[in-house]
Amino acid sequence: MVKKMKEDFPSRSGNKNSDKKQEPGSGEHEHVASSMKERVKSVIDKAVDTDKLKELSHRILPGETDTYNAAHSSAPFYDQETGVSAVITPGRFDSLIRSFLSELASGDDLDIHGEPSLASALLDDAWQANASDIHLDSEHDHIRLRLRIDGILLDIQKIDRTNGQKLINQFKAMALINPDTKLNIEEGRFTHELEHDQLDLRVLAAPCINGPKLTVRLLMRHNVEQQFHELGLSRENREKIETALETMSGMFLAAGPTGSGKTTTLYSLLHKLKRFEGNIVTIEDPVEYSIDGVNQIQVDEQHDLNMASGGKALLRLDPDCMLLGEIRDADSAWTAFNAAASGRILLSSIHSHEAVGVISVLRNYGISNQDIAANLNFVIAQRLVRKLCMDCRREEILRERDRKWFDQMHMQAPSSVWYPQGCKACKNIGFYGRTGVFEVWMLEDRHYEMILNNKDVIAMRREQEKQNHKTLIDEALDKLKEGVISPMELRAISGYGPLVRN
Ligand SMILES: [Zn+2]
Protein backbone atom coordinates (compact mmCIF):
# COMPACT_ATOMS: atom_id res chain seq x y z
CA MET A 1 0.00 0.00 0.00
CA VAL A 2 2.81 2.39 0.87
CA LYS A 3 4.29 1.81 -2.54
CA LYS A 4 0.99 2.53 -4.22
CA MET A 5 0.56 5.74 -2.32
CA LYS A 6 4.01 6.84 -3.33
CA GLU A 7 3.28 6.27 -6.97
CA ASP A 8 -0.09 7.89 -6.86
CA PHE A 9 0.88 11.07 -5.12
CA PRO A 10 2.10 13.84 -7.32
CA SER A 11 5.50 15.06 -6.25
CA ARG A 12 5.18 18.77 -6.41
CA SER A 13 8.39 20.58 -5.84
CA GLY A 14 6.39 23.70 -5.10
CA ASN A 15 4.93 22.23 -1.96
CA LYS A 16 7.72 21.37 0.44
CA ASN A 17 5.30 20.57 3.21
CA SER A 18 3.56 17.79 1.40
CA ASP A 19 6.79 16.41 -0.02
CA LYS A 20 8.10 15.98 3.45
CA LYS A 21 5.10 13.90 4.39
CA GLN A 22 5.67 11.53 1.50
CA GLU A 23 8.88 10.04 2.80
CA PRO A 24 9.11 6.34 2.00
CA GLY A 25 7.97 4.17 4.83
CA SER A 26 6.05 6.92 6.53
CA GLY A 27 3.87 5.20 9.09
CA GLU A 28 1.46 8.10 9.12
CA HIS A 29 0.92 7.77 5.44
CA GLU A 30 0.14 4.16 5.68
CA HIS A 31 -2.43 5.01 8.26
CA VAL A 32 -4.08 7.58 5.98
CA ALA A 33 -4.16 5.10 3.15
CA SER A 34 -5.72 2.35 5.18
CA SER A 35 -8.27 4.61 6.83
CA MET A 36 -9.25 5.96 3.44
CA LYS A 37 -9.55 2.44 2.12
CA GLU A 38 -11.69 1.45 5.10
CA ARG A 39 -14.06 4.28 4.39
CA VAL A 40 -14.42 3.41 0.73
CA LYS A 41 -15.01 -0.18 1.76
CA SER A 42 -17.67 0.75 4.25
CA VAL A 43 -19.45 2.87 1.64
CA ILE A 44 -19.69 -0.18 -0.58
CA ASP A 45 -20.35 -2.71 2.16
CA LYS A 46 -22.98 -0.90 4.07
CA ALA A 47 -24.78 0.10 0.93
CA VAL A 48 -25.24 3.60 2.18
CA ASP A 49 -26.28 6.08 -0.45
CA THR A 50 -23.47 7.12 -2.73
CA ASP A 51 -23.78 10.63 -1.26
CA LYS A 52 -21.73 9.21 1.57
CA LEU A 53 -18.80 8.99 -0.73
CA LYS A 54 -19.09 12.67 -1.40
CA GLU A 55 -19.02 13.20 2.33
CA LEU A 56 -15.96 11.04 2.49
CA SER A 57 -14.26 13.10 -0.16
CA HIS A 58 -15.03 16.22 1.84
CA ARG A 59 -13.41 14.72 4.88
CA ILE A 60 -10.33 13.96 2.92
CA LEU A 61 -10.49 17.24 1.09
CA PRO A 62 -11.86 19.61 3.69
CA GLY A 63 -12.83 23.05 2.61
CA GLU A 64 -14.97 24.04 -0.33
CA THR A 65 -17.75 21.65 -1.27
CA ASP A 66 -16.94 21.91 -4.93
CA THR A 67 -13.18 21.50 -4.58
CA TYR A 68 -13.39 17.91 -5.65
CA ASN A 69 -15.60 18.71 -8.59
CA ALA A 70 -13.58 21.60 -9.95
CA ALA A 71 -11.81 19.95 -12.81
CA HIS A 72 -8.53 21.79 -12.77
CA SER A 73 -7.95 22.83 -9.23
CA SER A 74 -5.73 20.99 -6.85
CA ALA A 75 -6.68 20.57 -3.23
CA PRO A 76 -4.83 19.75 -0.04
CA PHE A 77 -5.15 16.19 1.01
CA TYR A 78 -5.70 16.25 4.75
CA ASP A 79 -6.60 13.56 7.19
CA GLN A 80 -8.25 14.96 10.26
CA GLU A 81 -7.28 12.07 12.50
CA THR A 82 -3.58 12.11 11.76
CA GLY A 83 -3.04 15.65 10.56
CA VAL A 84 -1.21 14.40 7.47
CA SER A 85 -1.55 16.61 4.44
CA ALA A 86 -0.46 16.55 0.81
CA VAL A 87 -1.42 18.15 -2.46
CA ILE A 88 -3.69 16.09 -4.62
CA THR A 89 -5.56 16.95 -7.80
CA PRO A 90 -9.19 15.86 -8.24
CA GLY A 91 -8.12 13.50 -11.01
CA ARG A 92 -5.59 11.93 -8.70
CA PHE A 93 -8.22 11.60 -6.00
CA ASP A 94 -10.39 9.74 -8.46
CA SER A 95 -7.58 7.38 -9.41
CA LEU A 96 -6.83 6.74 -5.73
CA ILE A 97 -10.43 5.77 -5.11
CA ARG A 98 -10.27 3.50 -8.12
CA SER A 99 -7.12 1.82 -6.89
CA PHE A 100 -8.79 1.09 -3.56
CA LEU A 101 -11.83 -0.24 -5.36
CA SER A 102 -9.57 -2.44 -7.42
CA GLU A 103 -7.94 -3.91 -4.33
CA LEU A 104 -11.25 -4.41 -2.60
CA ALA A 105 -12.75 -6.09 -5.64
CA SER A 106 -9.82 -8.42 -6.24
CA GLY A 107 -9.35 -9.18 -2.57
CA ASP A 108 -12.79 -10.77 -2.46
CA ASP A 109 -13.51 -8.88 0.74
CA LEU A 110 -16.34 -6.71 -0.42
CA ASP A 111 -18.50 -8.10 2.30
CA ILE A 112 -17.37 -7.38 5.84
CA HIS A 113 -18.80 -10.62 7.16
CA GLY A 114 -16.76 -12.69 4.76
CA GLU A 115 -19.77 -14.06 2.89
CA PRO A 116 -19.84 -14.05 -0.89
CA SER A 117 -21.08 -10.69 -2.11
CA LEU A 118 -24.62 -10.25 -3.42
CA ALA A 119 -23.18 -9.40 -6.82
CA SER A 120 -21.17 -12.64 -7.09
CA ALA A 121 -24.21 -14.67 -6.10
CA LEU A 122 -26.33 -12.89 -8.70
CA LEU A 123 -23.70 -13.48 -11.39
CA ASP A 124 -23.69 -17.19 -10.63
CA ASP A 125 -27.49 -17.29 -10.82
CA ALA A 126 -27.60 -15.28 -14.04
CA TRP A 127 -25.06 -17.58 -15.61
CA GLN A 128 -27.03 -20.64 -14.54
CA ALA A 129 -30.15 -19.12 -16.10
CA ASN A 130 -28.29 -18.61 -19.37
CA ALA A 131 -28.79 -14.84 -19.20
CA SER A 132 -26.88 -12.46 -21.45
CA ASP A 133 -27.61 -9.28 -19.46
CA ILE A 134 -28.55 -8.22 -15.97
CA HIS A 135 -30.59 -5.03 -15.60
CA LEU A 136 -30.96 -3.17 -12.32
CA ASP A 137 -33.37 -0.24 -12.54
CA SER A 138 -34.17 2.19 -9.76
CA GLU A 139 -37.89 2.61 -9.28
CA HIS A 140 -39.92 4.52 -6.73
CA ASP A 141 -39.05 2.58 -3.57
CA HIS A 142 -37.21 -0.44 -4.85
CA ILE A 143 -34.76 -1.72 -7.45
CA ARG A 144 -36.12 -3.89 -10.24
CA LEU A 145 -34.00 -6.85 -11.28
CA ARG A 146 -34.44 -8.17 -14.80
CA LEU A 147 -32.51 -10.73 -16.83
CA ARG A 148 -32.26 -10.99 -20.59
CA ILE A 149 -32.58 -14.62 -21.57
CA ASP A 150 -32.60 -15.62 -25.22
CA GLY A 151 -33.08 -12.02 -26.24
CA ILE A 152 -36.16 -11.45 -24.08
CA LEU A 153 -36.03 -9.24 -20.99
CA LEU A 154 -37.70 -11.03 -18.07
CA ASP A 155 -38.84 -9.50 -14.79
CA ILE A 156 -37.20 -11.42 -11.98
CA GLN A 157 -37.57 -9.63 -8.69
CA LYS A 158 -38.14 -6.38 -6.85
CA ILE A 159 -35.31 -5.74 -4.42
CA ASP A 160 -35.62 -3.34 -1.51
CA ARG A 161 -33.65 -0.13 -1.83
CA THR A 162 -30.92 -1.06 0.64
CA ASN A 163 -29.99 -4.38 -0.93
CA GLY A 164 -30.53 -3.03 -4.43
CA GLN A 165 -28.21 -0.12 -3.78
CA LYS A 166 -25.70 -2.52 -2.28
CA LEU A 167 -25.80 -4.65 -5.42
CA ILE A 168 -25.32 -1.63 -7.65
CA ASN A 169 -22.40 -0.43 -5.55
CA GLN A 170 -20.76 -3.84 -5.58
CA PHE A 171 -21.02 -4.12 -9.36
CA LYS A 172 -19.64 -0.61 -9.76
CA ALA A 173 -16.78 -1.43 -7.44
CA MET A 174 -15.91 -4.61 -9.30
CA ALA A 175 -15.97 -2.70 -12.60
CA LEU A 176 -13.84 0.06 -11.06
CA ILE A 177 -16.53 2.65 -11.60
CA ASN A 178 -16.39 5.37 -8.98
CA PRO A 179 -19.67 4.98 -7.05
CA ASP A 180 -19.77 8.71 -6.59
CA THR A 181 -20.16 9.75 -10.22
CA LYS A 182 -23.71 10.56 -11.04
CA LEU A 183 -23.69 12.76 -14.10
CA ASN A 184 -22.31 10.63 -16.89
CA ILE A 185 -22.87 7.20 -18.31
CA GLU A 186 -19.88 5.22 -17.09
CA GLU A 187 -18.47 1.97 -18.33
CA GLY A 188 -16.23 -0.60 -16.72
CA ARG A 189 -15.37 -4.25 -17.01
CA PHE A 190 -14.17 -7.12 -14.89
CA THR A 191 -13.90 -10.88 -14.87
CA HIS A 192 -15.72 -13.28 -12.59
CA GLU A 193 -14.50 -16.79 -11.90
CA LEU A 194 -17.02 -19.56 -12.34
CA GLU A 195 -16.45 -23.12 -11.29
CA HIS A 196 -15.08 -24.24 -14.64
CA ASP A 197 -15.04 -21.06 -16.59
CA GLN A 198 -14.47 -17.38 -16.63
CA LEU A 199 -17.00 -14.66 -17.31
CA ASP A 200 -16.03 -11.37 -18.89
CA LEU A 201 -18.43 -8.67 -17.78
CA ARG A 202 -19.15 -5.19 -19.05
CA VAL A 203 -20.94 -2.81 -16.72
CA LEU A 204 -22.75 0.34 -17.83
CA ALA A 205 -24.01 2.74 -15.18
CA ALA A 206 -26.38 5.50 -16.21
CA PRO A 207 -27.99 8.20 -14.07
CA CYS A 208 -31.77 8.18 -14.46
CA ILE A 209 -34.36 10.37 -12.74
CA ASN A 210 -35.34 7.66 -10.27
CA GLY A 211 -31.76 6.78 -9.44
CA PRO A 212 -29.00 4.75 -11.04
CA LYS A 213 -29.58 2.22 -13.79
CA LEU A 214 -27.07 -0.51 -14.21
CA THR A 215 -26.66 -3.08 -16.94
CA VAL A 216 -24.19 -5.92 -16.74
CA ARG A 217 -23.44 -7.86 -19.90
CA LEU A 218 -22.17 -11.41 -19.51
CA LEU A 219 -19.61 -12.37 -22.11
CA MET A 220 -18.29 -15.88 -21.87
CA ARG A 221 -14.73 -16.30 -23.02
CA HIS A 222 -15.02 -20.03 -23.38
CA ASN A 223 -18.08 -19.61 -25.60
CA VAL A 224 -16.46 -17.25 -28.05
CA GLU A 225 -13.67 -19.69 -28.71
CA GLN A 226 -16.01 -22.59 -29.19
CA GLN A 227 -18.64 -20.75 -31.03
CA PHE A 228 -17.87 -21.18 -34.70
CA HIS A 229 -19.41 -24.64 -34.66
CA GLU A 230 -22.27 -23.46 -32.52
CA LEU A 231 -23.26 -20.37 -34.48
CA GLY A 232 -26.00 -22.27 -36.28
CA LEU A 233 -24.29 -22.43 -39.69
CA SER A 234 -25.33 -25.27 -41.94
CA ARG A 235 -22.57 -27.71 -42.73
CA GLU A 236 -22.39 -26.44 -46.29
CA ASN A 237 -21.98 -22.84 -45.17
CA ARG A 238 -19.44 -23.79 -42.54
CA GLU A 239 -17.29 -25.49 -45.12
CA LYS A 240 -17.57 -22.52 -47.46
CA ILE A 241 -16.36 -20.18 -44.74
CA GLU A 242 -13.55 -22.46 -43.62
CA THR A 243 -12.25 -22.74 -47.17
CA ALA A 244 -12.49 -18.99 -47.62
CA LEU A 245 -10.57 -18.34 -44.40
CA GLU A 246 -7.66 -20.48 -45.52
CA THR A 247 -7.08 -18.36 -48.60
CA MET A 248 -8.50 -15.22 -47.16
CA SER A 249 -7.55 -11.80 -48.41
CA GLY A 250 -9.47 -8.60 -48.92
CA MET A 251 -12.70 -7.80 -47.21
CA PHE A 252 -15.14 -9.88 -45.25
CA LEU A 253 -18.43 -8.31 -44.06
CA ALA A 254 -21.09 -9.49 -41.62
CA ALA A 255 -24.44 -7.92 -42.44
CA GLY A 256 -27.66 -7.69 -40.47
CA PRO A 257 -29.77 -5.43 -38.29
CA THR A 258 -28.78 -4.53 -34.72
CA GLY A 259 -28.79 -7.56 -32.41
CA SER A 260 -28.41 -10.12 -35.18
CA GLY A 261 -25.21 -11.60 -33.77
CA LYS A 262 -22.76 -10.01 -36.22
CA THR A 263 -20.17 -9.35 -33.52
CA THR A 264 -20.21 -12.95 -32.32
CA THR A 265 -19.67 -14.15 -35.89
CA LEU A 266 -16.75 -11.77 -36.43
CA TYR A 267 -15.14 -12.80 -33.14
CA SER A 268 -15.40 -16.48 -33.90
CA LEU A 269 -13.75 -15.80 -37.28
CA LEU A 270 -11.00 -13.83 -35.54
CA HIS A 271 -10.35 -16.83 -33.35
CA LYS A 272 -9.97 -18.98 -36.42
CA LEU A 273 -7.72 -16.44 -38.16
CA LYS A 274 -5.61 -16.11 -35.05
CA ARG A 275 -4.11 -19.50 -35.78
CA PHE A 276 -2.35 -18.39 -38.93
CA GLU A 277 -2.36 -14.61 -39.04
CA GLY A 278 0.41 -12.81 -37.20
CA ASN A 279 -0.57 -9.35 -36.12
CA ILE A 280 -4.29 -8.86 -35.51
CA VAL A 281 -5.67 -5.50 -34.40
CA THR A 282 -9.22 -4.35 -33.77
CA ILE A 283 -11.01 -1.08 -33.27
CA GLU A 284 -14.40 -1.54 -31.68
CA ASP A 285 -17.28 0.34 -30.12
CA PRO A 286 -17.41 -1.13 -27.57
CA VAL A 287 -14.86 -3.92 -27.16
CA GLU A 288 -17.30 -6.71 -26.33
CA TYR A 289 -14.95 -9.58 -25.65
CA SER A 290 -11.30 -9.46 -24.84
CA ILE A 291 -9.30 -11.96 -26.87
CA ASP A 292 -5.82 -13.09 -25.86
CA GLY A 293 -3.23 -12.37 -28.50
CA VAL A 294 -5.30 -9.70 -30.26
CA ASN A 295 -4.65 -5.98 -29.83
CA GLN A 296 -8.03 -4.43 -29.23
CA ILE A 297 -8.75 -0.72 -29.14
CA GLN A 298 -11.90 0.92 -27.91
CA VAL A 299 -13.48 3.84 -29.79
CA ASP A 300 -13.33 7.02 -27.74
CA GLU A 301 -15.32 9.74 -29.49
CA GLN A 302 -14.56 12.27 -26.76
CA HIS A 303 -10.90 12.10 -27.70
CA ASP A 304 -11.53 11.95 -31.45
CA LEU A 305 -10.78 8.26 -31.63
CA ASN A 306 -13.52 6.93 -33.90
CA MET A 307 -13.76 4.00 -36.30
CA ALA A 308 -12.26 6.04 -39.13
CA SER A 309 -9.40 7.81 -37.32
CA GLY A 310 -8.62 4.79 -35.15
CA GLY A 311 -8.62 2.50 -38.18
CA LYS A 312 -6.16 4.78 -39.98
CA ALA A 313 -3.89 4.87 -36.93
CA LEU A 314 -4.04 1.09 -36.62
CA LEU A 315 -2.76 0.65 -40.15
CA ARG A 316 0.53 2.12 -38.96
CA LEU A 317 0.87 -0.83 -36.58
CA ASP A 318 1.33 -2.96 -39.68
CA PRO A 319 -1.41 -5.49 -39.01
CA ASP A 320 -1.95 -8.61 -41.11
CA CYS A 321 -5.57 -8.66 -40.15
CA MET A 322 -7.78 -5.88 -38.91
CA LEU A 323 -11.26 -5.88 -37.44
CA LEU A 324 -13.10 -2.59 -37.80
CA GLY A 325 -16.15 -2.86 -35.53
CA GLU A 326 -18.65 -1.38 -37.92
CA ILE A 327 -18.81 0.38 -41.27
CA ARG A 328 -21.33 3.02 -40.33
CA ASP A 329 -20.59 6.03 -42.52
CA ALA A 330 -18.53 7.21 -45.47
CA ASP A 331 -15.43 7.77 -43.32
CA SER A 332 -15.35 4.30 -41.80
CA ALA A 333 -16.13 2.79 -45.22
CA TRP A 334 -13.10 4.55 -46.69
CA THR A 335 -10.90 3.38 -43.85
CA ALA A 336 -12.05 -0.20 -44.36
CA PHE A 337 -11.39 -0.10 -48.10
CA ASN A 338 -7.96 1.49 -47.63
CA ALA A 339 -7.00 -1.30 -45.26
CA ALA A 340 -8.23 -4.02 -47.61
CA ALA A 341 -6.59 -2.34 -50.62
CA SER A 342 -3.24 -2.38 -48.84
CA GLY A 343 -3.33 -6.17 -48.69
CA ARG A 344 -4.77 -6.69 -45.23
CA ILE A 345 -7.55 -9.00 -44.29
CA LEU A 346 -10.33 -6.71 -43.20
CA LEU A 347 -13.29 -7.90 -41.14
CA SER A 348 -16.19 -5.61 -40.40
CA SER A 349 -19.93 -5.45 -39.89
CA ILE A 350 -22.45 -3.40 -41.83
CA HIS A 351 -26.12 -2.62 -41.48
CA SER A 352 -27.94 -4.37 -44.31
CA HIS A 353 -30.87 -6.77 -44.39
CA GLU A 354 -29.43 -9.21 -46.90
CA ALA A 355 -26.11 -10.04 -48.49
CA VAL A 356 -26.44 -8.29 -51.87
CA GLY A 357 -27.90 -5.23 -50.11
CA VAL A 358 -24.37 -4.54 -48.85
CA ILE A 359 -23.44 -3.40 -52.36
CA SER A 360 -25.97 -0.58 -52.36
CA VAL A 361 -25.04 0.45 -48.81
CA LEU A 362 -21.39 0.74 -49.86
CA ARG A 363 -22.36 2.68 -52.99
CA ASN A 364 -24.35 5.05 -50.78
CA TYR A 365 -21.23 5.60 -48.68
CA GLY A 366 -19.48 6.78 -51.85
CA ILE A 367 -17.36 3.68 -52.50
CA SER A 368 -16.83 3.20 -56.24
CA ASN A 369 -17.85 0.04 -58.07
CA GLN A 370 -14.17 -0.48 -58.91
CA ASP A 371 -13.18 -0.42 -55.25
CA ILE A 372 -16.02 -2.72 -54.23
CA ALA A 373 -15.18 -5.21 -56.97
CA ALA A 374 -11.47 -5.09 -56.20
CA ASN A 375 -11.77 -5.74 -52.46
CA LEU A 376 -15.04 -7.30 -51.32
CA ASN A 377 -14.79 -11.09 -51.14
CA PHE A 378 -17.29 -12.43 -48.77
CA VAL A 379 -20.56 -11.40 -47.12
CA ILE A 380 -22.47 -13.20 -44.38
CA ALA A 381 -25.99 -11.91 -43.75
CA GLN A 382 -27.56 -13.13 -40.55
CA ARG A 383 -30.34 -13.05 -37.96
CA LEU A 384 -30.69 -14.46 -34.47
CA VAL A 385 -33.80 -16.53 -33.78
CA ARG A 386 -35.14 -18.36 -30.76
CA LYS A 387 -34.84 -22.13 -30.69
CA LEU A 388 -37.82 -24.23 -29.68
CA CYS A 389 -37.50 -26.02 -26.35
CA MET A 390 -36.73 -29.61 -27.30
CA ASP A 391 -38.43 -30.92 -24.17
CA CYS A 392 -41.87 -29.59 -24.96
CA ARG A 393 -42.11 -28.56 -28.65
CA ARG A 394 -45.20 -30.05 -30.29
CA GLU A 395 -45.68 -31.18 -33.88
CA GLU A 396 -48.90 -29.88 -35.38
CA ILE A 397 -50.66 -29.31 -38.70
CA LEU A 398 -49.61 -25.92 -40.06
CA ARG A 399 -51.89 -23.28 -38.54
CA GLU A 400 -54.04 -21.11 -40.81
CA ARG A 401 -52.08 -17.90 -40.26
CA ASP A 402 -48.82 -19.61 -41.16
CA ARG A 403 -50.35 -21.23 -44.23
CA LYS A 404 -51.38 -17.80 -45.49
CA TRP A 405 -47.86 -16.56 -45.06
CA PHE A 406 -46.49 -19.39 -47.20
CA ASP A 407 -49.09 -18.54 -49.86
CA GLN A 408 -48.08 -14.89 -49.85
CA MET A 409 -44.43 -15.85 -50.22
CA HIS A 410 -45.29 -18.25 -53.06
CA MET A 411 -43.58 -21.01 -51.18
CA GLN A 412 -44.63 -24.56 -50.69
CA ALA A 413 -45.81 -25.05 -47.11
CA PRO A 414 -44.79 -28.10 -45.08
CA SER A 415 -47.85 -30.03 -43.86
CA SER A 416 -46.74 -30.10 -40.26
CA VAL A 417 -44.32 -28.04 -38.21
CA TRP A 418 -43.30 -27.67 -34.56
CA TYR A 419 -44.87 -25.15 -32.20
CA PRO A 420 -43.76 -23.95 -28.74
CA GLN A 421 -45.61 -25.12 -25.68
CA GLY A 422 -43.83 -24.52 -22.37
CA CYS A 423 -42.49 -26.73 -19.63
CA LYS A 424 -40.32 -26.64 -16.54
CA ALA A 425 -37.08 -26.84 -18.53
CA CYS A 426 -37.84 -23.67 -20.50
CA LYS A 427 -39.56 -21.87 -17.60
CA ASN A 428 -42.83 -22.10 -19.54
CA ILE A 429 -41.53 -19.96 -22.38
CA GLY A 430 -41.51 -22.68 -25.00
CA PHE A 431 -38.11 -21.57 -26.32
CA TYR A 432 -34.63 -22.32 -25.11
CA GLY A 433 -31.49 -20.66 -26.44
CA ARG A 434 -30.95 -18.95 -29.75
CA THR A 435 -29.35 -19.81 -33.03
CA GLY A 436 -28.19 -17.89 -36.05
CA VAL A 437 -29.65 -18.09 -39.54
CA PHE A 438 -27.10 -17.31 -42.22
CA GLU A 439 -26.85 -16.40 -45.86
CA VAL A 440 -23.30 -16.88 -47.07
CA TRP A 441 -22.31 -15.10 -50.26
CA MET A 442 -18.89 -15.65 -51.78
CA LEU A 443 -18.48 -13.20 -54.61
CA GLU A 444 -17.54 -14.69 -57.95
CA ASP A 445 -16.51 -13.25 -61.30
CA ARG A 446 -20.06 -12.82 -62.55
CA HIS A 447 -20.91 -10.81 -59.45
CA TYR A 448 -17.87 -8.59 -59.88
CA GLU A 449 -18.90 -8.00 -63.47
CA MET A 450 -22.37 -6.95 -62.37
CA ILE A 451 -20.95 -4.59 -59.75
CA LEU A 452 -18.60 -3.01 -62.31
CA ASN A 453 -21.53 -2.61 -64.71
CA ASN A 454 -23.43 -0.82 -61.97
CA LYS A 455 -26.23 -3.38 -61.87
CA ASP A 456 -28.73 -2.79 -59.11
CA VAL A 457 -29.44 -5.06 -56.18
CA ILE A 458 -32.58 -6.56 -57.74
CA ALA A 459 -30.65 -7.68 -60.80
CA MET A 460 -28.00 -9.22 -58.59
CA ARG A 461 -30.59 -11.02 -56.48
CA ARG A 462 -32.11 -12.52 -59.65
CA GLU A 463 -28.67 -13.71 -60.66
CA GLN A 464 -28.28 -15.39 -57.27
CA GLU A 465 -31.63 -17.12 -57.61
CA LYS A 466 -30.58 -18.53 -60.96
CA GLN A 467 -27.59 -20.08 -59.24
CA ASN A 468 -29.78 -21.61 -56.52
CA HIS A 469 -28.18 -19.37 -53.96
CA LYS A 470 -29.63 -20.00 -50.49
CA THR A 471 -31.21 -16.92 -48.95
CA LEU A 472 -31.91 -16.30 -45.27
CA ILE A 473 -35.47 -17.55 -45.83
CA ASP A 474 -34.20 -20.77 -47.40
CA GLU A 475 -31.89 -21.38 -44.48
CA ALA A 476 -34.62 -20.59 -41.96
CA LEU A 477 -36.96 -22.96 -43.79
CA ASP A 478 -34.45 -25.76 -43.29
CA LYS A 479 -34.41 -25.02 -39.58
CA LEU A 480 -38.23 -24.98 -39.54
CA LYS A 481 -38.38 -28.40 -41.16
CA GLU A 482 -35.84 -29.76 -38.70
CA GLY A 483 -38.04 -28.54 -35.85
CA VAL A 484 -35.40 -26.18 -34.54
CA ILE A 485 -37.54 -23.06 -34.96
CA SER A 486 -41.25 -22.27 -35.12
CA PRO A 487 -43.09 -20.57 -38.04
CA MET A 488 -43.12 -17.42 -35.90
CA GLU A 489 -39.34 -17.06 -36.27
CA LEU A 490 -39.51 -17.69 -39.99
CA ARG A 491 -42.08 -14.92 -40.42
CA ALA A 492 -39.96 -12.56 -38.31
CA ILE A 493 -36.99 -13.04 -40.61
CA SER A 494 -38.99 -12.25 -43.72
CA GLY A 495 -40.35 -9.14 -42.04
CA TYR A 496 -36.94 -7.55 -41.91
CA GLY A 497 -36.35 -6.89 -45.55
CA PRO A 498 -37.41 -7.19 -49.15
CA LEU A 499 -36.54 -10.83 -49.57
CA VAL A 500 -38.43 -11.15 -52.81
CA ARG A 501 -38.81 -14.51 -54.41
CA ASN A 502 -39.71 -15.13 -58.03
ZN1 LIG B 1 -40.02 -26.49 -22.67
Image: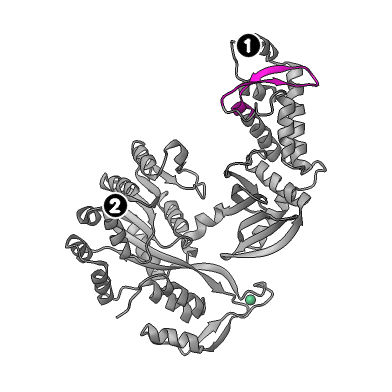
Amino acid bearing label 2? Gly
Residue 315 % position (x, y):
34, 39
Colour convention: one colour
The Cα–Cα distance between marks 1 and 2, rounded to whole angstroms, is 58 Å
- In the picture shown, does residue 69 fall above or below 426? above
Amino acid bearing label 1? Asn
Q: Is residue 466 left or right of residue 192?
A: left
Query: Which quadrant, please, contains the C terminus?
Result: bottom left
Q: Quadrant of residue 278?
A: top left
- In the picture shown, does residue 395 fall above or below 36? below
Q: Quadrant of residue 280?
A: top left
> Where are the magenta residues, as a range?
72-93
Query: Which quadrant, please, contains the N terminus?
Result: top right
Circle number at residue 15 = 1
Q: Is residue 79 left or right of residue 4?
A: right
Residue 45 % position (x, y):
77, 42
Say which element carries label 2. loop
Residue 179 appears in view = yes
Q: How many marks?
A: 2
Q: Nearer the viewer, residue 54 or 340?
A: 54
- Observer-side mark, 1 or 2, equals 1
Residue drawn at x 42%, y 65% as measured from the top left: 382
Residue drawn at x 54%, y 57% as measured from the top left: 223
Q: Which residue is mark 2?
A: 250
Q: Is residue 357 left or right of residue 163?
A: left
Residue 110 appears in view = no
